[in-house]
Image (cartoon, rainbow, N blue to C red):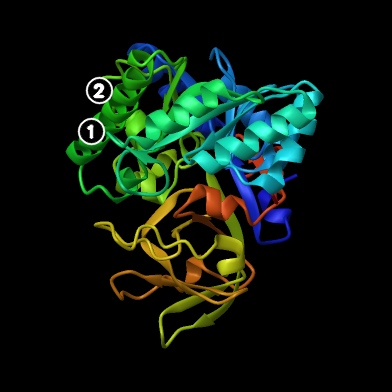
Amino acid sequence: MNLLNLETPCLVLDRGKMEKNISSLHARMKALGVNLRPHGKTAKNIDVIQIAIAGQSGGITVSTLKEAEYYFGHGIKDIVYAVGIAPVKLDHIANLMKQGAAITVLLDSVEQVRFVAAKGVEYGLSIPALIELDCDGHRSGVPLGDSLLMEIGRLAHDEDGVELAGVLTHAGASYQCKSIEEIRAVAETERYVAATSAGVLRQNGLPCPIVSVGSTPTAWFAEDLTGVTEVRAGVFVFQDLVMAGLAVCDVDDIAISVLTSVIGHQKKKGWVITDGGWMALSRDRGTAAQKVDQGYGLVCNVEGQSLQNLIVASTNQEHGIIADRGGNEVDWNSFEIGSAVRILPNHACGTGAMYDKYYVTDGSTEITDVWSRVNGW
């Protein structure tokens, strides 16, 4: 099989780039002395995750129960479900645990402790739970110094049906940083909030075996992880244009791309029309707030070499419009009708979610394998 013979749009994975990305973060985590718990939400594929967990002592992270069920079905038992728990999901979790899965849930309220405990008692289980911490005001969690930490911790420790497993935080604000120095500062805040909160629990006689932090930017630029037991990251396996804009990677490190076909020209407007619209690329515009706005994706030739001045400037549902970012004339001979181009994504997770499989290459246009993805919730 060859990329030139595929029906477009479709998702392409450069295995060599992916393996390099994974080995780079593995080396960094080893140097910092912590376990890497890869997040399965980016890859949604067992082949990628098996490479990502090789040599690590812990399990994986997921963001959907579909992922949890899929990875458990492929032999991975140690799973952190890193989204605040809702009652309607607990029967699913309990049934997976009854089959042998070791699933840890996330909570940041007394109400959650109570309904998790009740479900655990109902099924004869003790469901492990991490207290989610808010380290940067980005999303959910208990702020540092809030008495709610001890209230949740004490209840989770004392109630039957639930087990206090530790604390978890996510430095989502790292994605909005403007410099490496800012990311390092966010990483230190992330570490400090998690380690300090763990200390509060322990000082009050409560267990806190797990101290979990993570995002791809902070995983890459953290300088000290004292007090942390594990780091979670997901995008690192593929990287994307947002990560490149944060200096986490180079554009040439991005391992996934969308193969599209040229279906038209609007020469007076300087547009190349492709069949890769927002249904193929996603609507993510994560680079819009960065120094270099990559539109809906950066254009590459079919071999995967980036054409730095060409971006997908706008999209419709099934149409992508390629244009020169500086308004310069397009080399129309390089974009003949029917030819193929590849688009690097702003956000690997969002773009990947559009597809059910990867066409795996060895860096050329030859396809070496086809790997399935699991989607849905």
Residue extending furthest toward the bottom = 268
Residue lying at 64% horizontally and 35% vertically, measured from the top left: 116
Q: Amino acid at mark 1?
A: Arg
Q: Please tell me how crowded label 1 is: few (under 14), some (14-19), or many (20+) other residues with Cα within 10 Å.
A: many
Residue 184: assigned label: 1
Q: Please tell me how crowded label 2 is: few (under 14), some (14-19), or many (20+) other residues with Cα within 10 Å.
A: some
Nearer-the-camera pick, 308 or 246: 246
Residue extending furthest toward the left = 181
Residue 223: assigned label: 2
Residue 209: assigned label: none
Please say if 166 is above or below 369. above
Nearer-the-camera pick, 120 or 320: 120
Q: Secondary structure at mark 1?
A: helix
- Percent coordinates x, y for residue 136 in the rendering: 29, 43
Q: Amino acid at mark 2?
A: Glu
Label 2 close to label 1 by CB (< 8 Å): yes
Label 2 – label 1 distance at C-alpha: 7 Å
- Percent coordinates x, y for residue 346 in the rendering: 44, 55
